[in-house]
Image (spheres, helix red, strand yellow):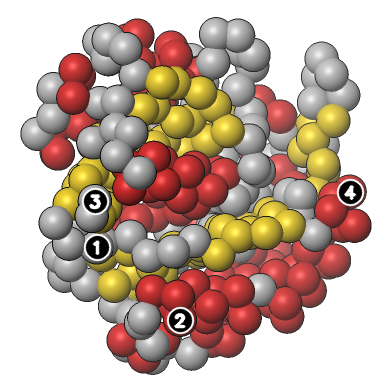
Amino acid sequence: MVMTRISAVGYHQPEHVMTNDDLAGMVDTSDAWIRQRTGITSRRIARDESVQDMAVTAAGKAMAAAGLAPDEIGQVIVATCSAVDRVPSVAAQVAGRLGIPSAVAFDLNNGCAGFTTALATAEHGVRAGVVRHALVIGAEKMSAVTDWTDRTTCVLLADGAGAAVVSASDEDGIGPVVWGSDPTRRDMVRMRDEWRPRFAQEGQSVFRWATTELAPFAREACARAGVAPGELAGIVTHQANLRIIEALARAIDAPNAVVARDVTVSGNTSAASVPLALAKLVERREVPVGAPVLLFAFGGGLAWAGQVVHCP
């Protein structure tokens, strides 16, 4: 029986740092107001880089860390909601630029839950024996869809990319996914207008939903993996804002887990936030190799997806 694991991760962030004071010069806000409501102190903004540029860099790092040649990758999935190009897909462009010769390549849009949804999709393919190695990327240029006159959303959004290699394994390193959606609340997070989409959300409603209704799904992901919350070594949720992250972590009740708080310096990067935060935990070796980590993302749809993985 084929089992699966995350064999390597990688990430990329633009060089330009936008501080809260920078934003205070653009809209009616302040460093104190942003910190109090979001926990964010700074974020990265792409100037000349595209979604595919950031995806290629993050994916290349993950492939190198896994020690894989391009022709060993059988699948490429890019989770994104901010890409400009419809055809060819960002995934096809990434595969071409990395020299991956014949992989199935496609984009997946599930909003901020995109990466964990894509991770489960790739994991199913590897477990079924269709491919041995899949490249899963979350990449976003949210600054391109930001309304820079709306102080409630422009203080949140940012750019970046994270990637993971899913590989066939002799040991089970990726637990069953728990995923779903509540389409009756589909308009609570929006990015509409065919030619110039702009991100908008009902912030208070999303906050209440995330902090009061999602913890049972996260705990279910633990249960399906056979891991008690107290056994978790890490929790990486969607980096929406610090208040949501900390409330959700408390509700999951995992006292021994390192909780990723990358949002404080990276902002909300939508589908890129989970792999970006995970890759940084790995880089700093805050969680031991092989230790259980809960990945759990949520957002527009309203959608959620999560699974327990063994830390690469």
**Nearer the viewer's eye, disc 4 or disc 3?**
3
Assess whether mark 4 and mark 2 are in contact (beta carbons under 8 angstroms): no
Cα separation between marks 2 and 3: 21 Å
**Which residue is most to the front?**
1
Question: Could you tell which of marks 2 and 4 lies nearer the N-terminus?
Answer: 4
Question: Could you tell which of marks 1 and 2 lies nearer the N-terminus?
Answer: 1
Q: Residues within 10 Å of mark 2 (few under 14, many from 20)?
A: some
Rendered-image quadrant of the C terminus: bottom left
Cα separation between marks 2 and 4: 31 Å
Question: Could you tell which of marks 2 and 3 lies nearer the N-terminus?
Answer: 3
- Residue at 45% x, 31% y: name it: 77
- Residue at 54% x, 15% y: name it: 89
- Residue at 34% x, 56% y: name it: 278
Cα separation between marks 4 and 3: 40 Å
Tag on residue 187?
A: 4
Q: Residues within 10 Å of mark 3 (few under 14, many from 20)?
A: some
Q: SS class of the residue under badge 3?
A: loop
94 or 157: nearer the viewer: 94
